[in-house]
Image (tube, rainbow, N blue to C red):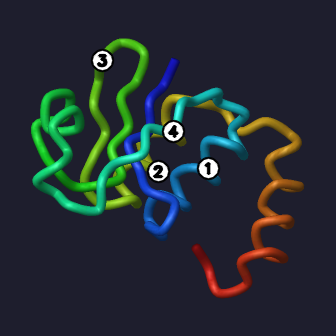
Amino acid sequence: MIKLYQAEWCPHSHKIRQRLTELGVPFIAMQVSVDREQRAELKQVSGQDTIPAVVLEDGTVLSGKDETILSKLNEIYPEPPEAAEHKEKDKKNYPFGG
C-alpha cells in the first residue's frame, strides 16, 4: 500500500491526500514530527526530511513540490468518475485551497 509521509497541518500534504482520495487510491498516512530532526523514518525511506513524500508500493519515492507529486500520481492512476464529486466537496469545505 502507498505510504504518505505528511502532517495534518501541512497544506501541501492536504493536496496529496485529496488527490489520492479523488483517484480512489488507498494509502496509509504516516504522521511526521514537526521537528525535522525527529523524522528518522522519513529520512531513511526518502533521503530527505521534508513533506509530503509518497512511497509507492514498488518503493519509488515521490517528493519535492506537491505539483511534481501530483503530476506523477496523475500519470500512474486513471481518474475515476467519482473524482468530480470529491473535488466539489473539497472546494466547498476548503474554499481557499488546502
Amino acid tagged 3? Gly
> Callout 4: helix, strand or loop?
strand
**Circle 2 sits in a helix, a strand or a loop, which is it?**
helix
What's under tag 1, amino acid-wise?
A: Arg
Say which residue appears at 30% left-offset and 53% top-offset.
Answer: 33
Is label 1 in contact with label 3 (beta carbons under 8 Å)?
A: no
* In the image, residue 14 above or below residue 98: above
Q: Quadrant of residue 34?
A: bottom left
Residue 3 position (above or below residue 11):
above
Q: Which residue is mark 3?
A: 59
Position of 17 with respect to 4 (left or right) is right
Identify the residue position indicated by label 4 in the image: 29
Residue behind mark 1? 19
| Three-letter code, disc 4 | Ala
In the rendered structure, which amino acid carries the disc numbered 2?
A: Leu
Q: Earlier in the sequence, mark 4 or mark 1?
A: 1
Report whether 72 appears left or right of 15.
left
State which tag comes first along the sequence, 2 or 1: 1
3D distance between C-alphas at marks 2 and 1 = 7 Å
Judging by the rendered image, the residue that carries numbered circle 2 is: 70
Q: Residue furthest top?
A: 58
Residue count near mark 4 (Cα–Cα under 10 Å), binned few <14, some 14–19, many ≥20: some
Q: Are marks 2 and 1 in contact (CB under 8 Å)?
A: yes
